[in-house]
């Protein structure tokens, strides 16, 4: 939807702050992993997203209501991606400013690769 609505094309020149939650954060990454793909753009399924940052995000880490979002699942997900990635809980944020990545957290998170 970010591409179809043309919002994605506006972001590179945008001077504001983008705040994404859950899938709204994941869409900024290069890939989300097959576990999170819920759409089919064609006959071939893809986990590619917008790629504004150079890492992927596994959200809602160890959330009580999401039994598939355990630390073990996150490790398996990251292993399949073979790329820089973060698994973060709902008490964690990732800030990217001028290419510098900061993890801001009062919770649980892990960086892979």
Image: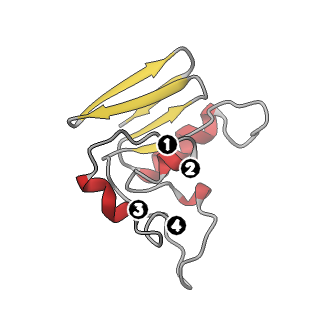
C-alpha gap between disc 3 and disc 4: 8 Å
Residue found at the far bottom of this picture: 43
Of the residues tagged 3 and 4, which is closer to the observer?
Answer: 3
Q: Nearer the viewer, mark 2 or mark 1?
A: 1
* Mark earlier in primary sequence (1, 3): 3
Q: Quadrant of residue 76?
A: top right
Residue 19 x %, y %: 46, 39
Q: Residue at x 57, y 17 (%)?
A: 107
Please identify the residue farthest to the front as the structure is shown. 15
Disc on res. 23: 2
According to the image, what is the colour scheme of the structure? secondary structure
Residue named by callout 4: 1
Of marks 2 and 4, which one's residue comes earlier in the chain? 4
Closer to the chain start, of discs 3 and 2, is 3
* Callout 3: SS: helix
Q: Residue at x 35, y 42 (%)?
A: 84
Q: CA distance from mark 2 to mark 4?
A: 11 Å
Comparing labels 2 and 4, the label whose residue is closer to the camera: 4
């Amino acid at each position: 939807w970010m591409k179809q609505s043309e919002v994605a094309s506006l972001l590179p020149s945008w001077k504001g702050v983008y705040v994404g939650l859950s899938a709204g954060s994941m869409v900024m990454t290069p890939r989300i992993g097959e576990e999170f793909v819920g759409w089919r753009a064609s006959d071939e399924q893809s986990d590619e997203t917008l790629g504004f940052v150079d890492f992927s995000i596994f959200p809602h880490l160890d959330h009580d209501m999401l039994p598939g979002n355990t630390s073990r699942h996150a490790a398996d997900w990251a292993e399949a991606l073979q790329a820089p990635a973060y698994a973060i809980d709902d008490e964690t944020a990732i800030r990217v400013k001028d290419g510098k990545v900061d993890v801001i957290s009062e919770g649980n998170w892990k960086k892979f690769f």
